[in-house]
Image (tube, rainbow, N blue to C red):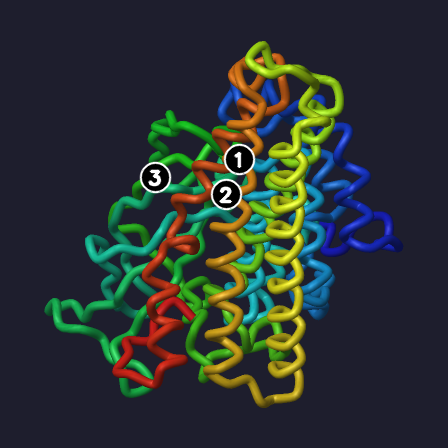
């Protein structure tokens, strides 16, 4: 097993992501058509070691600062949102799992630069039965982004005793993630969607699959943490949120840049001058630039504050709430920029041959994700007001 990449990483994740942009641009339409990444893109991600950005250094990973991770995801998304979505999903999933697994199991699963992890969202219709030495897992999960390009899948489930009662661990109901070979699952090719098509986020099923103890991490249980560090203290939900927000910012930036380039030379048939001389267009572009830049600055500020607090051992609920606000508001602000840029382009935007159409679909699909939903803002509002609150997704 090549536990470390063949060539040591000597450039930043952001620079490596930027270097991939021409390739991602060239393959974007084909990945959208295939509903998966091309082999050339997958190999380039392996070569640039882009699937171990957050993995603990003790496992051969890079364990980079969360701000650097943000910037890398944004640069990838500027070229192709599906690639960036997969990179974020895989990095957070593998890193947070590895931090709660035994060193041996984590090295086996994630020690190679060619290994990632895909899994679907948690629900209450699966079951993991506690048995000697491990668990018997049964269930179906959807949205396994990038799962066509990983050897491992994962799933989440509450744990039950053989008699059907909740299994207790650390004084509370046991809830775990389970990592297993993709070949152990039945894959359903059902990823026919509006956007982010290249992620190939299929549905998969396992039935009575035995998962050894070492491959069933309780990612959110501090009692079982094998690796310490600020990334793993922040934990998975806000790491996902950070990366996905960066993805929407990258798409929004590309859409706005394309709008500006179009406005420099296009004249609408309903207008008397080119778009660049239109006061309303000038004002809109300035406002969109301010909105996107503000969202990015807010995200980066909250990321640094949260990461630094986690590193110092004084991460608070206030930090978590502020990062939640920055990520959810940022995703919606970036979506607004993408929508405005698409609408401003007129019929130019609807053509497959032009840069707007696919990226608009990607932006709209990203905007529907759990991390972007308005109830998160309501929760933060209640926190700021000091009223009764249900704290979740932090």
Q: Nearer the viewer, residue 225 or 333?
A: 333
When the figure is inspected, residue 279 is found, relative to residue 311, above or below; the finding is above
Q: CA distance from mark 3 to mark 1?
A: 36 Å
Q: Secondary structure at mark 2?
A: helix
When the figure is inspected, residue 11 is found, relative to residue 276, above or below; the finding is below
Q: Position of residue 79 (x, y in %)?
A: 68, 34
The residue that appears at 68% across and 17% down in the rendered structure is 273
Q: Position of residue 214 (x, y in %)?
A: 46, 67
Q: Is residue 53 visible?
A: yes
Give the label, 3 or 1, closer to the camera. 1
Q: Secondary structure at mark 3?
A: strand
Give the label, 2 or 3, closer to the camera. 2
The numbered mark at residue 204 is: 3
When the figure is inspected, residue 107 is found, relative to residue 33, above or below; the finding is below
The residue that appears at 19% across and 53% down in the rendered structure is 125
Neighbours of disc 2 within 10 Å: few (<14), some (14-19), many (20+): some
Q: Position of residue 16 (x, y in %)?
A: 80, 46
Q: Position of residue 139 (x, y in %)?
A: 25, 48
Which residue is label 2 attached to? 336
When the figure is inspected, residue 328 is found, relative to residue 189, above or below; the finding is below
CB under 8 Å between callouts 1 and 2? yes
Mark sitting earlier along the chain (3/1)? 3
Figure quadrant of residue 129:
bottom left
Neighbours of disc 1 within 10 Å: few (<14), some (14-19), many (20+): some
Q: Is residue 60 visible?
A: no
Mark sitting earlier along the chain (2/3)? 3
The numbered mark at residue 340 is: 1
The residue that appears at 49% across and 33% down in the rendered structure is 196
Q: CA distance from mark 2 to mark 3?
A: 33 Å
The numbered mark at residue 116 is: none
Quadrant position of the C terminus in the picture? bottom left
């Amino acid at each position: 097993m090549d536990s470390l990449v063949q060539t040591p990483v000597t450039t930043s994740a952001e620079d490596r992501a930027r270097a991939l942009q021409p390739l991602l641009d060239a393959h974007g339409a084909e990945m959208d058509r295939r509903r998966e990444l091309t082999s050339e893109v997958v190999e380039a991600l392996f070569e640039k070691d882009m699937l171990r950005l957050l993995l603990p250094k003790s496992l051969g990973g890079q364990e980079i600062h969360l701000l650097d991770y943000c910037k890398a995801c944004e640069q990838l998304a500027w070229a192709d949102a599906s690639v960036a979505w997969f990179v974020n999903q895989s990095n957070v999933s593998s890193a947070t799992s590895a931090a709660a697994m035994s060193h041996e199991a984590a090295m086996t699963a994630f020690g190679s630069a060619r290994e990632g992890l895909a899994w679907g969202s948690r629900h209450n219709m699966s079951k993991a039965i506690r048995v000697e030495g491990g668990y018997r897992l049964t269930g179906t999960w959807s949205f396994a982004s990038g799962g066509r390009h990983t050897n491992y899948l994962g799933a989440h489930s509450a744990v039950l005793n053989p008699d059907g009662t909740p299994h207790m661990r650390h004084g509370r109901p046991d809830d775990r993630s389970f990592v297993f070979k993709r070949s152990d699952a039945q894959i359903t090719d059902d990823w026919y969607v509006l956007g982010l098509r290249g992620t190939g986020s299929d549905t998969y099923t396992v039935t009575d699959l035995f998962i050894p103890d070492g491959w069933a991490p309780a990612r959110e249980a501090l009692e079982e943490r094998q690796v310490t560090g600020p990334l793993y203290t922040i934990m998975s939900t806000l790491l996902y949120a950070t990366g996905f927000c960066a993805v929407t910012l990258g798409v929004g930036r590309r859409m706005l840049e394309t709008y500006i380039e179009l406005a420099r030379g296009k004249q609408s048939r309903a207008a008397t001058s080119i778009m660049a001389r239109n006061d309303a267009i000038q004002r809109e572009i300035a406002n969109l630039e301010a909105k996107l830049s503000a969202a990015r600055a807010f995200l980066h500020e909250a990321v640094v504050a949260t990461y630094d607090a986690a590193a110092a051992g004084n991460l608070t609920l206030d930090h978590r709430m502020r990062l939640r606000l920055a990520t959810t508001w940022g995703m919606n602000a970036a979506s607004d920029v993408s929508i405005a840029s698409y609408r401003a382009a007129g019929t130019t935007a609807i053509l497959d041959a032009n840069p707007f159409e696919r990226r608009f679909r990607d932006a709209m699909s990203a905007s529907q994700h759990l991390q972007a939903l308005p109830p998160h803002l309501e929760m933060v509002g209640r926190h700021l007001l000091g009223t009764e609150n249900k704290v979740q997704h932090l």
